């Protein structure tokens, strides 16, 4: 069996005539933890959406999980194969309790009932989620609680490939550490984690095997944890200069602070 959990080759995604992903290649072996960083609008979330099967995009290329092509499969098959995403903006599921939600997914994924029960009990204790099991998924949870709930769901469902999109955004400093430690604790030889983050702070509490930088729809640089330090020091501009990359014409321009204020802020 291949040791590659996720193999992405020349993935392109467009909406209408706008190209968003322009040829992404990424290999993540089982047991490894990879971080993707990159400026706003560079295509990080789009890559997650393409993997999980959001329908907005025209997609080309290949993404295999454990050697099985994902991109031609419906969303439910991708989950059954072991792909799970934690969202930048976790969705609320009104009227469905968290435990009930997990039971339904576990049923679809053929996780035996007693196995699920054991995992639920252990993870609820570990992440202090007992009070949330009967509450509707993510409804009226604080930002931090939603992220904790996503990690809890991952611990219960034990995906083969977990894609975490900005699981650290909107968290206070202690919560960032808790989430990071929880992700690190999930590390196992049967699982690969791809985490998108803007903050090298979270990378202090867990050690990615590789860091990839995405710019304008491509991965332009990969390296070890020292790459995050370089970005912290010099920002993406310094990396662009080192790699000789021109800011693309279509890329969003950084706004000057003064541009955030207009004479008619509520003109809608
Ligand atoms: N469904 C869509 N329709 C039109 N444009 C889209 C769609 N999805 C993404 N885009 C555009 O693609 C670009 C990349 O967006 P994406 O959300 O992937 O960026 P990101 O790297 O995750 O940014 P951030 O760091 O701000 O979360 C943006 O310009 C965005 O507006
Ligand atoms: Mg994003």
Image: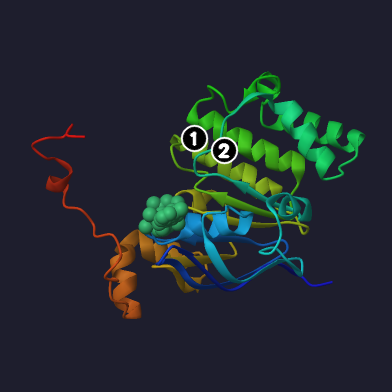
Please indicate, yes or no, whether residue 199 appears anywhere in the rendered image: no
Do callouts 1 and 2 mark residues in contact (Cβ within 8 Å)? yes
Q: Quadrant of residue 221?
A: bottom left
Q: Which circle marks residue 250 in the picture?
A: none
Q: Which mark is residue 174?
A: 1
Do we see residue 97 in this rendering? yes
Asked where in the image residue 266 lies, by quadrant, the reply is top left
Between the residue at mark 1 and the residue at mark 2, the CA separation in whole angstroms equals 6 Å
Q: Residue at x 56, y 24 (%)?
A: 139
Q: Quadrant of the N terminus?
A: bottom right
Residue 45 horizontal side relative to residue 131, left or right: left
Label 2 Cα crowd, 10 Å radius (few <14 / some 14-19 / many 20+) = some
Residue 178 placement (x, y as % from top left)? 57, 38
Mark 1, secondary structure of its residue: helix
Q: Position of residue 20 (x, y in %)?
A: 43, 65
In the displayed structure image, the side of residue 62 where residue 267 appears, left or right: left
């Amino acid at each position: 069996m291949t040791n590659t959990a996720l193999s992405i080759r020349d993935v392109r995604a467009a909406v209408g005539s706008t190209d968003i992903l322009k040829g992404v290649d990424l290999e993540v072996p089982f047991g490894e933890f990879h971080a993707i960083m990159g400026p706003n609008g560079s295509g990080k979330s789009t890559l997650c959406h393409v993997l999980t099967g959001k329908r907005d995009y025209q997609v080309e290329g290949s993404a295999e999980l454990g050697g099985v092509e994902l991109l031609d499969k419906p969303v439910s098959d991708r989950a059954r194969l072991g792909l799970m995403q934690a969202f930048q903006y976790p969705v609320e599921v009104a009227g469905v309790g968290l435990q009930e939600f997990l039971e339904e997914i576990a049923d679809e994924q053929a996780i035996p009932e007693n196995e699920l029960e054991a995992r639920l009990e252990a993870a609820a204790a570990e992440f202090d989620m007992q009070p949330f099991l009967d509450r509707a998924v993510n409804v009226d949870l604080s930002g931090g609680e939603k992220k904790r709930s996503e990690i809890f769901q991952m611990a219960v469902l034990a995906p083969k490939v977990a894609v975490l999109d900005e699981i650290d955004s909107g968290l206070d400093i202690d919560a960032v550490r808790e989430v990071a430690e929880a992700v690190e604790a999930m590390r196992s030889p049967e699982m690969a984690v791809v985490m998108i983050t803007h903050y090298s702070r979270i990378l202090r509490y867990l050690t990615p095997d590789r860091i990839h930088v995405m710019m304008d729809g491509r991965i332009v640089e990969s390296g070890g944890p020292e790459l995050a330090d370089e970005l912290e020091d010099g920002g993406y501009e310094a990396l662009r200069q080192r790699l000789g990359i021109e800011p693309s014409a279509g890329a969003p321009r950084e706004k000057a602070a003064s541009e955030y204020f207009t004479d008619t802020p509520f003109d809608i």
